[in-house]
């Protein structure tokens, strides 16, 4: 392996990862191990060409974030692939309209590429508005739209005037960065709606929930908790999202941000423009879930609210702890590998797994930040492999090296795990079981148990 | 078949993009890693789409275009991409598919390949074989991408030295189980053959315990080279890569079989996908002619059992109506088969799912037959969906479904008959234990 260099930056890197020739030169600094003296890994880099990254593109980032806005049209301007591969892609449930589950494309053809796709886009938006009467329309531009010179913003302005609803261009050519840059594009699109309408009355103690996408109805679980505490939830961005609620989002007192990777930028813009403070929370695992409730009560300096939160947590703990103990007894000693989209989620997963006796031996994400990875480094047991923007070659090697029993990831990680005899827990965005909240923690434990304890593994040894 | 009302937009597309079809073909070459020359998302979306169907690892590399590559050209990313694939995967072959982006900015992929070879031959490194296919997603669907890639690979690799007693078989976008069936059939006939592309193992592998960077299986490169020496070709399909009007290359598009016939005078037997007894008979008759041998007893019996099954269950299917969709070659074959058993088939050329859903109100179908993406229509109409073809994302076992030959027809027939009986039984006020 003459073309793979060992690490040369002199840091304490005892793991044989590099030496075995698994890592490409340019990826050496995106992998490290937990431990006080270890370096925090590099991140926020473009994926390396040819490395088979598990990430998608700018378009993907914007699409997944805006997808759960259920009463808006989502029209993808470009050739067919981008629309086809994102049709009904997230398990984001709606309590009303289901417009978001339809896939619309201008399906650009060769002649459109030559002569321009503007007329086709205009006609498409008009006909679809007339067909569905949406509250707004998001127009996603894909790779070639900028290259062929279509003026999408102008078309959006024209249709907006004609039809009287917001038509929002989402500038998402895939090549303009990574999936994370797409989150930012989505935040900008959402922000154009914020503050454009005020509802007659928004209660003082109201929050916006940012970064929950109502996968398998998770948002509804949270709404129930906040309702019990007497907190008014104003806009949910974007899970079960409504255009009118987003327009009124500036009237909330606080932004409660989960999935910070995707939503911090929006929270920051809302802070700058409307002075709305924000807090970072996670709804995975019972510790983080409880903190999410307490922190909100603390923010409003409301004793009654805090008492209700405590009561709720106590009730849930009484119910859950014995059940979780049952799982812990059986799962203790198991080792897990985590590779998910956002690093903040990974952090909660490490804690949730610990609660049921499972040790995390690999923790990685597609889009984590330096702060996230620093936190992971401190949180994890010494020797845990920490990785940013990994790929099948690395992941399959890491799990073998660390002898993981279970893998927690998404669709693309599942066959890697299964092919080499690891259990697998879906933590992707098409999952059907809620994993957030107290109920979610129990589901998570059940799922880990089901995959770790299946009798089929005797045939893979 | 009827004509669709035309909407300007495509609503819930039935087709996928061309690089997906190309990736499938590349997965059917032994030792091959596909590279999609475009943005990172193209490769990742296609991987995700294929993984959800095949339930197998599908590693596809991307040259990961940046703003810089889009403005100044993707040569640098292409070279880095190839270098990293070579380091990590050590492939014999790299299959390169272009995208809408790389085509629109006019990337010279053959030039990049030359450049890579020149700069790496000097230092003595091992150079993989490159196969390049032009697959802009604004031109045709995944079916075009598939057949154009079969053609590109054959053109690039096949040589002619001397004619030998070998048959080329290009089955098209069939399932891994179908490919395994074809291989068994040809072996039972005692024929030498080259089946291309063969993803029966690469996309439907056994449990391996170790992560195979490049899964075992695929048509060996040496076999693809010998395609030019064969005495005959059989290719399944009628529309192939010819359903779109292209401004580039218009009129010059051939199938791989046509190209071999015009270049090396290898007789090409083009035929519809053998679904149903009549088309399967035609296929078997062609094999008998080429091999000079009669149909093996095992397969004669499979045909016999199929006829017997037709007779036993004919009343349950006769007069029913099916709404079918998918790749055109697949749909025309299915329509003819359904006609053979007395089922009326409706399909709409080039339609998207929303058009199908609207038209279904007039057709009043008894069931849907096609990939899993039509499920929402079946659910709305409260009628069965018989899942066949590609993709099947909401069930297991898609790779194990047989569609072609007597065996495939038998399996499809049982699926359809039982779906109709199940529906009737479920909706019966009393329920029953016998037919």
Image (spheres, coloured by chain):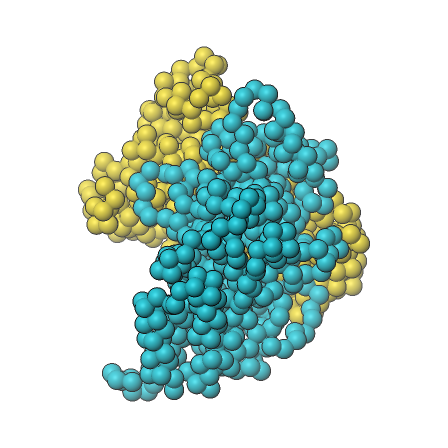
Chain colours: A yellow, B cyan
In the rendered image, residue B389, in percent from the top left (x then y), is placed at 47, 63
Q: Residue at x 50, y 66 (%)?
A: B273
Q: Residue at x 58, y 29 (%)?
A: B80
Q: Is residue A177 above or below residue A418?
A: above
Can residue B299 be seen by looking at this rendering? yes
Q: Is residue A128 above or below residue A345?
A: below
| Label tally | 0
In the rendered image, residue B200, in percent from the top left (x then y), is placed at 41, 52
In the rendered image, residue B393, in percent from the top left (x then y), is placed at 44, 58
Q: Is residue B420 above or below residue A344?
A: below
In depth, the one of B178 and B378 nearer the eye is B178
Say whether residue B420 is left or right of residue B118.
Answer: left
Q: Residue at x 37, y 48 (%)?
A: B205
In depth, the one of A410 and B197 nearer the eye is B197
In depth, the one of B48 and B430 nearer the eye is B48
In the rendered image, residue A40, in percent from the top left (x then y), is placed at 46, 23
Say whether residue B377 is left or right of residue B420.
Answer: right
Q: Quadrant of the C terminus of chain B?
A: bottom left
In depth, the one of B108 and B235 nearer the eye is B235
Q: Quadrant of the N terminus of chain B?
A: bottom right
Among the 4 quarters of the image, the one containing residue A364: top left
Residue situated furthest top in the rendering: A10
Say whether residue B22 is left or right of residue B283.
Answer: right
Can residue B396 be seen by looking at this rendering? no
Q: Residue at x 38, y 28 (%)?
A: A385
């Amino acid at each position: 392996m003459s073309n793979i260099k060992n690490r040369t930056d002199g840091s304490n890197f005892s793991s044989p990862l590099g030496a075995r020739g698994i890592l490409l030169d340019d990826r050496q600094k995106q992998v490290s191990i937990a431990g006080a003296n270890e370096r925090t890994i590099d991140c926020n880099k473009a994926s390396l060409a040819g490395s088979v990254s598990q990430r998608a593109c700018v378009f993907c980032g914007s699409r997944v974030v805006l997808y759960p806005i259920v009463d808006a049209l989502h029209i993808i301007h470009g050739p067919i692939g981008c629309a086809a591969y994102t049709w009904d892609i997230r398990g984001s449930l709606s309590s009303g309209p289901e417009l978001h589950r339809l896939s619309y494309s201008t399906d650009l053809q060769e002649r459109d590429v030559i002569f321009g796709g503007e007329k086709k886009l205009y006609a498409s938006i008009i006909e679809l508005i007339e067909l569905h009467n949406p509250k707004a329309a998001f127009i996603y531009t894909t790779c070639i739209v900028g290259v062929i010179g279509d003026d999408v913003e102008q078309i959006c302005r024209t249709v907006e005037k004609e039809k009287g609803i917001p038509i929002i261009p989402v500038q998402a050519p895939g090549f303009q960065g990574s999936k994370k840059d797409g989150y930012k594009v989505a935040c900008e699109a959402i922000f154009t709606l914020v503050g454009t309408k005020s509802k007659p009355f928004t209660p003082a103690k109201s929050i916006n929930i940012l970064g929950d996408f109502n996968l398998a109805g998770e948002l509804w679980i949270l709404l129930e908790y906040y309702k019990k505490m007497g907190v008014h939830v104003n806009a949910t961005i974007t899970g079960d999202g409504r255009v009118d609620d987003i327009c009124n989002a500036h009237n909330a007192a606080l932004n409660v941000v989960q999935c910070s990777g995707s939503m911090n930028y929006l929270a920051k813009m809302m802070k700058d423009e409307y002075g709305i403070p924000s807090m970072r929370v996670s709804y995975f695992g019972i510790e983080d879930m409880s903190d999410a409730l307490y922190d909100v009560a603390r923010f409003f300096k409301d004793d009654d609210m805090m008492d209700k939160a405590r009561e709720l947590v106590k009730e849930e703990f009484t119910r859950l702890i014995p059940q979780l103990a049952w799982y812990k007894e059986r799962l203790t000693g198991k080792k897990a590998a985590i590779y998910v989209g956002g690093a903040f989620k990974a952090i909660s997963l490490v804690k949730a797994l610990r609660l049921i006796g499972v040790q995390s031996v690999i923790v990685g994400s597609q889009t984590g930040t330096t702060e996230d990875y620093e936190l992971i480094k401190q949180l994890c047991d010494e020797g845990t492999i920490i990785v940013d923007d990994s790929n099948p070659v690395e992941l399959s090697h890491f799990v073998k090296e660390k002898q993981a029993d279970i893998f927690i990831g998404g669709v693309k990680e599942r066959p890697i795990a299964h092919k080499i005899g690891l259990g697998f827990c879906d933590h992707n965005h098409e999952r059907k079981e809620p994993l957030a909240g107290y109920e979610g923690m129990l589901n998570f434990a059940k799922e880990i148990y089901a995959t770790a304890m299946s009798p089929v593994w005797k045939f893979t040894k | 078949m009827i004509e669709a009302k035309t909407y300007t937009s495509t609503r819930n597309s039935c087709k996928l993009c061309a690089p997906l079809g190309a990736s499938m073909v590349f997965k059917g070459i032994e030792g091959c890693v596909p590279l999609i020359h475009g943005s990172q998302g193209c490769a990742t979306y296609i991987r995700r789409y294929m993984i959800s169907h095949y339930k197998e690892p599908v590693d596809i590399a991307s040259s990961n275009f940046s703003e810089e590559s889009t403005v100044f050209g993707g040569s640098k990313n292409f070279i880095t991409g190839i270098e990293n694939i070579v380091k990590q995967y050590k492939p014999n072959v790299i299959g390169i598919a272009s995208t809408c982006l790389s085509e629109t900015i006019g990337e010279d992929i053959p030039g990049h390949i030359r450049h890579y070879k020149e700069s790496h031959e000097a230092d003595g490194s091992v150079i993989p074989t490159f196969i390049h296919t032009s697959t802009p997603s604004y031109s045709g669907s995944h079916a075009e991408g598939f057949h154009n890639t079969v053609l590109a690979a054959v053109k690039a690799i096949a040589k002619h030295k001397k004619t030998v007693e070998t048959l080329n078989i290009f089955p098209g976008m069939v399932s891994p189980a179908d490919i395994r069936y074809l291989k068994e059939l040809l072996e039972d006939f005692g024929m030498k053959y080259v089946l291309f592309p063969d993803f029966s193992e690469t996309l439907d592998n056994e449990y391996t315990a170790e992560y195979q960077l490049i899964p075992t299986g695929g048509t060996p490169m040496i076999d693809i080279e010998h395609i030019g020496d064969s005495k005959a070709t059989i290719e399944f399909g009628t529309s192939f890569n010819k359903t779109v009007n292209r401004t580039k290359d218009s009129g010059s598009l051939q199938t791989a079989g046509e190209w071999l016939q015009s270049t090396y005078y290898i007789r090409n037997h083009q035929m519809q996908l053998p679904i149903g007894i009549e088309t399967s008979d035609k296929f078997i008759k062609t094999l008998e002619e080429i091999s000079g041998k009669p149909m093996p007893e095992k397969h004669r019996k499979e045909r016999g059992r199929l006829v017997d099954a037709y007779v036993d269950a004919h009343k349950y299917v006769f007069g029913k109506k099916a709404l079918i969709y998918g790749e055109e070659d697949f749909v025309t074959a299915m329509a003819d088969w359904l006609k053979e058993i007395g089922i009326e088939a409706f399909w709409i050329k080039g339609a998207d799912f929303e058009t199908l859903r609207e038209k279904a109100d007039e057709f009043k179908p008894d069931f849907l037959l096609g990939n899993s993406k039509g499920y929402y229509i079946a659910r709305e109409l409260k009628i069965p969906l018989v899942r066949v073809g590609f993709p099947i994302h909401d069930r297991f076992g898609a790779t194990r479904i047989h569609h072609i030959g007597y065996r495939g027809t038998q399996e499809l027939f049982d699926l359809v008959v039982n779906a109709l009986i199940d529906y009737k039984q479920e909706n019966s006020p009393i329920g029953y234990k016998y037919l």
